[in-house]
Amino acid sequence: MIPDFKPYNDVALSDMDAITEHNNLINQFKYAEATQKIINNGSLKTKGLRSSFFNLIENKIRELQLYCLNRTAEPQLYYSFEEPDLEFMREQNKTFWIKPL
């Protein structure tokens, strides 16, 4: 369980009771009941709950990809999604920056 994961994007103030109850059920490890809470609440079911969850997974996969690429890289190569500054490359003793696809 990820403690500060709150997958709510576009919720209205009127949904806060349901969200609070959902979070309490998650904290009590009552996952089935928490899922039912979302399924039974038509307002929450149509909001951005699923997209937030999959965005979290995508970000974790990207971090893992960078970790694995840098772990197995040639000594002079550095992988990252943003171009590192020259000072960082010198400190790390890297010559080439590669942006993964």
Image (cartoon, rainbow, N blue to C red):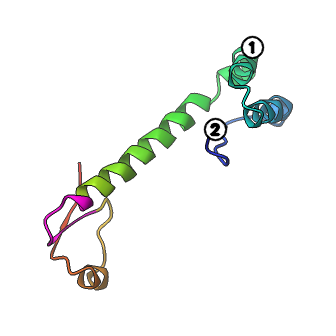
Type of amino acid under label 2: Pro
> Between 46 and 78, which is closer to the camera in this rendering?
78
Q: Is residue 65 above or below residue 13?
A: below
Q: Is residue 35 above or below residue 7?
A: above
Residue situated furthest front in the rendering = 29
* Left/right of residue 64 with respect to residue 39 in the rendered view: left
Type of amino acid under label 1: Asn
Is disc 2 placed on a helix, strand or loop? Answer: loop
- Label 1, on which residue? 40
> Between 24 and 14, which is closer to the camera in this rendering?
24
**Where's residue 96, x and y in %?**
15, 71
Label ID, residue 7: 2
**Where's residue 2, x and y in %?**
61, 44
Give the Cα distance between marks 2 and 1: 17 Å
**Where's residue 60, x and y in %?**
44, 46
| Residue 99 in view | no
Part of the protein shown in magenta: 70-79
